[in-house]
Every structure is written in structure tokens, then in C-alpha cells.
Image (tube, helix red, strand yellow):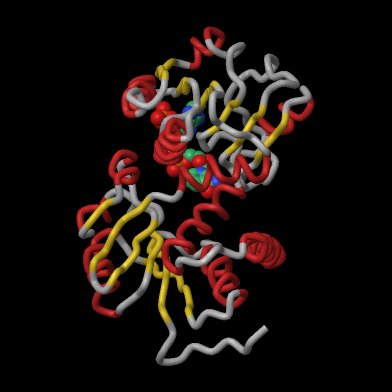
Amino acid sequence: MKQWLIDTGTVMHGVFGDPVKHSKSPAMHNRAFRELGLNAAYAAFHVTPDRLKAAVEGIRALGFRGVNVTIPHKLDVMNYLDEIEESAQAIGAVNTIVNDNGKLTGYNTDGIGYVRSLKEEAGFDVKGKKVLMLGAGGAARGVAYALAKEGAAAVYIANRTEAKAVELADMIGSMTVSAGISYGQLKEVQDQVDLVVHNTSVGMHPNVDEVLIDTSWFHEGLTVSDLIYNPPVTRLLREAQARGAKTHGGLGMFIYQGVYAFEYWTSLPAPVDAMREAVLEAFRSEAGRS
Ligand code: NAP
């Protein structure tokens, strides 16, 4: 591999978040730049909400090619961009900014990253399939939109706050059959679905023994997918495996949202395997330090 130096020609990228210290995006994107021999670099920036506007102005002022935005900026950042791509507009959140000579366009690569990961890693093609989503928060919005856009035959959304499930179902209602329900109504749809997608934080580290729903109805014909990637195999996925269902973890969604961002910035096919390896390495070295 060519020696890698930052110099006056280096094209800059980064991630804005609060907090941002544990982000694996710098490891992932820098590995991808190196892999393709590009003179480009990616760093993490701790941007507090009161400085978000100035930070976005800095993208233009400093000539960054692209930036990812993460919690808590995905909504507010939309106020400071020149254009917002149609799907990001519908989802109501931006996680990727592309700078074309000072014109900033916002995209959302979370949902399409999820669907691509599902296809590549679990071999699951959404077209014509019925889906049950558990949770209706920020991540679920991108996932629901991408599932509908990809041709899902139906998307049922259950959420603790039922009104949010209904609102999300309405958002995708022109693209597919959809309904927002309570967890008490799961029985009405569970026997029809091909895919279950878990979109809440229940079962995430450190609460790894938690599980959101009774999984006794899971079966061999079902694919169960969890957006959580820490731990890589949640209790929900363990229970799904025990009942013979096919499972899919959340790491791929993180990697493929980065893959799409990389491709928007560089117009080159992203080196997916190297990116995955870099993220796994970053997790391993973090675990080694703690
Ligand atoms: P969010 O906007 O805060 O939404 C949280 C969701 O979880 C809501 O639906 C909320 O229900 C539900 N919830 C939280 N605690 C609950 C409980 N005790 N019982 C039932 N429901 C509960 O969060 P988010 O950004 O969407 O993230 C959701 C999950 O996705 C997290 O685990 C996150 O790590 C994961 N994620 C993964 C990726 C990836 O790349 N793999 C990317 C983004 C997020 P209410 O509406 O009723 O509060």
C-alpha cells in the first residue's frame, strides 16, 4: 500500500457529533481512502448544538468535501444546508453532507444502508415481503422509508408510543400497505410477516439481558434483524436463532451507511471488506483498552 501522508492536497472529511469520541467512522473511512490510494482524510469533531451552524459554515469555509452528522444533529443540521435530497426530506433527518464547490446537499444513508446490508449479509430481498418493525424512533424512520421504497408488500410498525407508530405508518402510506399498532396488537400481524426488524434500544449494551417482546412465535421461515450492534448478537437474535429463524445484526447497517456516504463523496465503489475490517479492529482495540 502507498505511503499515506496528509499534505496541502488532502481532501478533508469528518463527522460532527456530541458525543463523538467513540465513533468508528474515522477508522472506517480512513481505511477506505488508504485502500483506494486517495489523498483524503476523515476526522471526528465534537460539535455542541450551539456551534452546529458555525461548524456547517466551516465545511464551506475550509473546503471539506463531505461530512457525516450524528446524534444529536441529524434534524437541526437541515436548517443550514442548501438542498436536501428527497428521501432525507421525507425521513426528516440528514446523516451525510456533500459539498459541491460550496453548495451543501444533505442525504440520509441510514435506511438505504440498512436495506443493502440486509440484502448482502442475510440474502433477504425486501420486494414483495411483509415486515413487522418494532420501534418508531429516528433510526426506524429511515428504515421504514427504505423498506417501503424497496417494494415491501406491507410494513406494520409497533411502538410503545403508538401515536409515533401511526405517524410513521402514514409517512410511508403512499408507498406501501402500512399500519401503526401497539405491542398488544402484535398477534394480529405476526403470522403474516417474513421479516421482523427491531429498532429500539432494548437489549443494547449494558442491558444485554433485556428483550422487547415475547419471541415464542418466531419460526424457521422468519428473518429477524436487529439494528443494535453492541452486542453483535442480542438476546432477541439469540432467541430467534434458537427457534430456527435466520438472523441479521446491526453492524452491517453502520458499515453500509458509511459505504453510501463514501460513494457520494468519491463517486468510486467503496472497499466494503476493508471498511468492515477497520470497524471490527476499532471495536477490538476499544475492548482491549477497557
Ligand atoms: P430513538 O430515536 O431514541 O428511538 C428509540 C426507540 O426505542 C423508540 O421507538 C422508543 O419508543 C423505543 N424504546 C426505547 N426504550 C424503550 C423501552 N424500554 N420499551 C419499549 N420501547 C422503547 O433512537 P434511534 O436513534 O432510533 O435508535 C434506536 C436503536 O437503533 C438503538 O439501539 C441504536 O443503537 C440503533 N441504531 C443502529 C444503527 C446502526 O447503524 N446499526 C443506526 C442508528 C441506530 P417510544 O417512541 O415509545 O419512546
Position of the N terminus, as image quadrant, is: bottom right
The number of discs equals 0
As drawn, is 58 to the left or to the right of 30?
left
Image location (x, y in percent) of residue 289: 68, 67
**Residue 236 figure quarter:** top right
Question: In the image shown, does 92 or 46 lie closer to the viewer?
Answer: 92
Q: Is residue 39 left or right of residue 171?
A: right
**Residue 151 visible in the current orientation:** yes
- Residue name at image x 58 percent, y 42 percent: 228
**Left or right of 270: which side holds 283?**
right
Residue appearing at x 38%, y 68% in the figure: 66
Percent x, y of residue 257: 50, 53
Residue 55, how many percent across, how many down? 28, 69
The image quadrant where one finds the C terminus is: bottom right
Q: Position of residue 79 (x, y in %)?
A: 20, 54
In the rendered image of this protein, does residue 72 appear above or below residue 165?
A: below
Task: Inspect this view and state whether residue 290 appears.
Answer: no
Camera-nearest residue between 112 and 280 = 112
Q: Residue furthest bottom?
A: 8
* Identity of the residue furthest to the top in this view: 188
Residue sitting at x 34%, y 40%: 91
The answer to whether 75 is drawn above or below residue 136 in the figure is below
Q: Is 186 left, or right, of 105 in this rendering?
A: right
Q: Residue at x 68, y 63 (%)?
A: 277
> Where is 218 relative to 204, above or below?
above
